[in-house]
């Protein structure tokens, strides 16, 4: 009895793309190719995402570096500005404190005298809104304690002192002849307390104060350790 033989399946049927990579007639081949392209697209996307993240990080580092550079630039500008202001600002200082006399107004029971305070601007820009404050005291005699006297009520305001210019504050008052004589003999010391406030051309406030004491009837001298200000 003859046995019928079934035709053998072609080995190409199960491997449609291995030997015929361009076989468009095989649906299985087309599906495999689609899977391959999907895998490749996924890989490309992953690398693209990594590259993007790396680029973002570089951008953020650049922003931080730029921020640091900007801050450093602002700090350098601030230092330069402060240095310029210190070089150009007004600097007031005392340029002498001395006695004044008005002998024509003397009387038997009084000596008409006073104190003149001179302040000079040693800076390069004007000192604005200058305000003087002057007080007097005396030391010597019984107990040698400092006794406060009156505050000078005269005009204390100056609108402006130009660079290298000066302003004077004259205070006049009466002293008993006996006290005036003791001051002249250095048996009493007359003390002038001066305080000056002003603003520089950049609008910054400043102040200066010092004490000066009599040396007889001559010019008064600065009291060591009494200076305060900037």
Image (cartoon, helix red, strand yellow):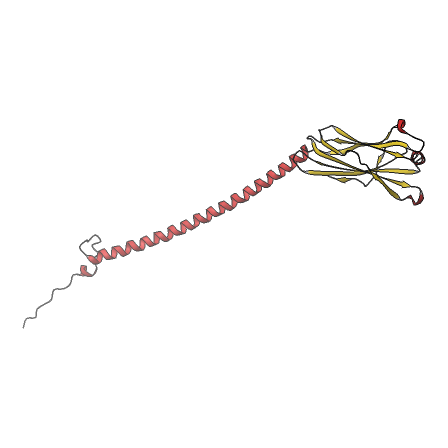
Residue at the image point whose x is 39% and y is 51% from the top? 49
How far across and down, in percent of the image, does residue 28 sit? Answer: 21, 58
Figure check: 77 above or below 51:
above
Q: Nearer the viewer, residue 111 or 68?
A: 111
Residue 17 appears in the figure = no
Q: In which quarter of the image is the N terminus?
A: bottom left
State which quadrant residue 42 falls in.
bottom left
Figure check: 145 above or below 172:
below
Residue 210 appears in the figure = yes
From this viewpoint, which residue is outermost toward the top?
104
Q: In which quarter of the image is the C terminus?
A: top right
Q: How many labels does the image show?
A: 0
Residue at the image point whose x is 80% and y is 38% from the top? 210
From this viewpoint, which residue is outermost toward the bottom?
1
How far across and down, in percent of the image, does residue 120 sit? Answer: 75, 31
How far across and down, in percent of the image, does residue 53 sit? Answer: 43, 51
Q: Is 22 on the left or on the right of 131, as rendered?
A: left
State which quadrant residue 147 falls in.
top right
Residue at the image point whose x is 46% and y is 46% from the top? 59
């Amino acid at each position: 009895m003859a046995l019928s033989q079934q035709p053998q399946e072609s080995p190409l049927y199960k491997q449609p793309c291995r030997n015929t990579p361009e076989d468009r007639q095989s649906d299985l081949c087309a599906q495999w190719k689609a899977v391959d392209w999907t895998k490749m697209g996924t890989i490309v996307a992953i690398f693209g995402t990594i590259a993007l993240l790396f680029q973002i990080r570089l951008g953020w580092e650049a922003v931080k570096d730029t921020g640091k550079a900007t801050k450093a630039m602002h700090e350098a500008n601030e230092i330069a500005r402060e240095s310029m202001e210190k070089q150009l600002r007004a600097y007031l200082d005392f340029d002498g404190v001395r006695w004044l006399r008005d002998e024509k107004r003397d009387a038997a029971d009084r000596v008409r005298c006073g104190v003149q305070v001179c302040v000079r601007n040693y800076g390069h820009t004007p000192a604005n809104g200058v305000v003087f404050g002057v007080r007097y005291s005396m030391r010597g005699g019984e107990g040698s304690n400092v006794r406060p006297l009156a505050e000078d009520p005269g005009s204390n305001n100056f609108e402006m002192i130009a660079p290298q210019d000066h302003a004077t504050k004259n205070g006049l008052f009466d002293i008993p002849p006996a006290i005036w004589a003791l001051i002249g003999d250095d048996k009493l010391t007359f003390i002038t307390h001066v305080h000056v406030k002003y603003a520089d051309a950049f609008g910054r406030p400043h102040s200066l104060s010092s004490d000066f004491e009599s040396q007889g009837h001559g010019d008064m001298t600065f009291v060591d350790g009494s200076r305060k200000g900037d």
